[in-house]
Amino acid sequence: MEQEKQRLIIPFIGLNEGIHRFEFKIDSSFFGQFDYSIIEKGEFKIKVEFEKKKNLFNLYFKLKGKITANCDRCLAPLTMKVKGEESLIVKFGETTYNETDEIKVISPAEYELDLAEDVYQFVHTLMPNKVKHEKKKDCDPKIIEQLEKLTTKKASTEVDPRWEGLSQFKDKSE
């Protein structure tokens, strides 16, 4: 039996114009519902300031939580605290608009807004490019030792004969 997907819903149809606040909590099961998610474990608190206007919505997100991922250096699990802010404009229209990530177009027939996909993307942008322990000494010492053995190479002064002919084109002024 397939688990029901977690949705982050704002039922905007009955709301008056103005600012409304919503709060959501997501955990590892949220990330598990997306195929090929980089994040497998995580817990987040998402605060959304929802401004309803006549023809559009302005949304401001504050995301705060922690992500558990594997260190890129030693592959040991590493928990990182992350936080960030994002914004989104939601307009009504019949055609989709894919020019930017900050604008989303929904059908005029919609009565609620599901933010699950947007929050999923926002959380992934909070991840650093390289996930690693701040200090190398916090990494798995066995793995670091193996890496150092593999990366230590003796400098070779011998020139490969295939490239030797190119030396005649080298700038002599160097």
Image (spheres, rainbow, N blue to C red):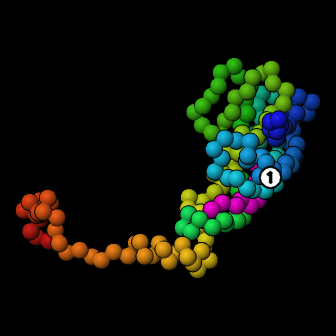
Question: Which residues fall within the magenta stretch?
Answer: 60-71
- Where is residue 132? Give x, y as percent: 59, 67
- Badge 1 crowding class, 10 Å Cα cut-off, few under 14, some 14 to 19, many 20 or more, is some
Residue 75: quadrant of the picture: bottom right
Residue at x 48%, y 74% (from the top left corner): 146
Relative to 132, is 41 on the left or the right? right
- Where is residue 77? Give x, y as percent: 66, 65
Relative to 65, is 129 on the left or the right? left
> Is 128 placed above or below 112 here?
below
The kind of secondary structure the magenta stretch mainly shows is strand
Task: Please say whether residue 156 is visible from this viewpoint.
Answer: yes
- Where is residue 80? Give x, y as percent: 69, 65
The residue where tag 1 is placed is 27
Residue at x 57%, y 33% (from the top left corner): 99
Relative to 105, is 144 on the left or the right? left
Residue 58: quadrant of the picture: top right
> Is 75 placed above or below 12 here?
below
Residue at x 77%, y 39% (from the top left corner): 115
Query: Which residue is nearer to you in this view: 134 or 23?
Result: 134
- Magenta-colored stretch includes residue 151: no
